[in-house]
Amino acid sequence: MGAQMTQRIAALAAGAAVAVLVLSGCAPETGARDRGESAAQRQAFPAVYEQSVEWRECDSSLGYRDGVEELLTEQGARVDGMRCALVDVPLDWNDPENPETIRLSTVRVPATGDEPIGTLLSNPGGPGASGIDFALGMTIQESFAAVQEHYDLLGFDPRGMGRSTPLECESESTIFELELAMCADQDPLASSMGSAQVARDMELLRHLVGDDTMHYPGFSYGTVIGASYATIFPERVGRLLLDSAWPSDWSSPLGSYEQHAAISGALAELLAQCGVEYEVAACPMGGEDALVQTMQQLTAQPLTATDGTRVDGDMLSGYLTMSLYRLPAGREDALDAVGRALGGEQQAVDDIAAAMSGGGARVSLSGMVVRCLSAPRDANLVGLVDFIEANGLPRLLGGPEITDDTLRQFVDLKCEALPDSGEDFLAFSNDGDAPILVIGVTGDHATPYAGAQQLVSELGNARLLTLEGRGHIASFQNRSSCADAAAIAYLVDGELPPEGTVCADD
């Protein structure tokens, strides 16, 4: 689902969240799958497994706008009968002796067909994006209708995020390391927000809705949650679709650098193709060298929005990076706005400042807590340097010369400030019988294609589907009927695409 759709759904569903006790029920579990870590977790935390959950109207008492179902229906969403609940989960799944709990905010949308296969959980990534808004947004996508016919949808905001129990930290410092350290000191939730903890939350949700196996499409960082689930609970894996995937070391300095390098390459290509593939009246600049020069100029003398916001080189780069998440029409709009802003048009400057007012694609403090908890304990700085020396340093990242000055920004040890950094790191695997479908986009700037290839190798029992194209996320984006058909066949019928399948954009 695109960024603009996500924002629209979030606006429609917005409200003030409060804690409300809710009740519900689930079916007992029996059979061959009732063993392994799934059974061990249930035995270690009986109280949350015995809770009742009652699905109720989604209203302002649960953090939604009143009448949200009708508002979404008017936008074309298939949400008839949607219901919401708060579910108690342990504060820390690693400590059975700790009785403290937090709450997950969830939404359930009934399948549109008469005989649903089961329940489909999902997560759009971030870390920090709302799984509730994502699930509701998917009900608008026509390409997703065939999946929704066969599944009840269960959206949830991960722990510490959105309408779930939030991470609450205050700091007057602008030093990020101090913010992390103070946050961990102020709120114990900062020690239990990693990907493995979220995967364990999902296992509880699976049990509470009465499904025997986990069915889940995860996108971007959501693939980390899905891979974490498969690693911990292979006996419960049903149909896991991991689109635009990250491998185990996604949160290492090397993983971060590979993303920065991919973004730099995508920006250079975006500008080089302006006027060729994108219908823009006047291209803002000629390519990578021109972008570097323009960023330097704006850093020295920023443009100023009407509200006083300074549009400097970093903001301009961030705005163009945001456009990479959009379909071609959205990228054209961004290129046009930058051209007009650099040409002196005040409205275009104001539009860029407004678009970046939420921080753009930057990860929030709570998202960085997740990244740090899920980071490998070995930062592998030697591997980072070896990779840069072997592949070169893009000009947008300070290259081509590789020196201490150009490397310093990537030798990122910020997570050392979080006492429990690395606590939730997992070496991914899939030891269960059910294969996982992984999708990678060759020109993906946010989750480089090599990561999808690496994840398939790590999981073992997995199949890779490749989309030749640019941009982030392959399936259910109104871009590739081939990728959509493969995703639908897998989620609905359990059919994997043939080995080596390559799709293209329509």
Image (cartoon, rainbow, N blue to C red):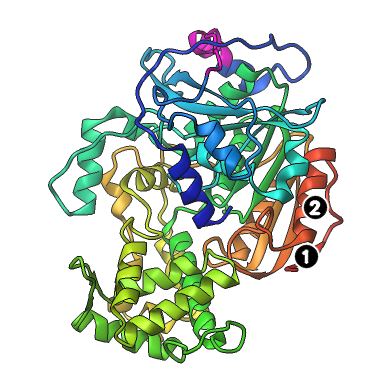
Residue 46: in magenta span = yes
To which residue does mark 1 refer?
A: 503
Residue 435 in view of the camera:
no
| Residue 272 x %, y % | 53, 87
Q: Is residue 155 above or below residue 176?
A: above
Res. 50 image quadrant: top right
Residues at circles 1 and 2 in contact by the CB criterion of under 8 Å: yes
Which residue shows up at 48% across the image and 49% down it? 8
Q: Position of residue 213 (x, y in %)?
A: 72, 26
Mark 1 or mark 2: whose residue is earlier in sequence: 2
SS at circle 1: strand
Q: Residue 180: which disc?
A: none
Vertical order, 48 against 289 (above or below): above
Q: Which residues are magenta?
A: 42-56
Give the residue drawn at x 40%, y 26%. 60
Q: Nearer the viewer, residue 504 or 142?
A: 142
In the image, what residue occupies the spot 46% across and 79% down?
A: 335
Residue reaching furthest to the left: 172
Would you name the residue on which mark 2 appears?
A: 486
Residue 293 shown left or right of residue 108 in the figure: left
Inter-mark Cα distance, 1 to 2: 9 Å
Q: Amino acid at mark 1?
A: Cys
From the top left corner, tell me how far across and down residue 487 is, in percent.
76, 49
| Amino acid type at image mark 2 | Ala
Q: Is residue 350 above or below residue 163?
A: below
Q: Nearer the viewer, residue 351 or 403?
A: 351
The 10 Å Cα crowd at callout 1, few under 14, some 14 to 19, many 20 or more, is some
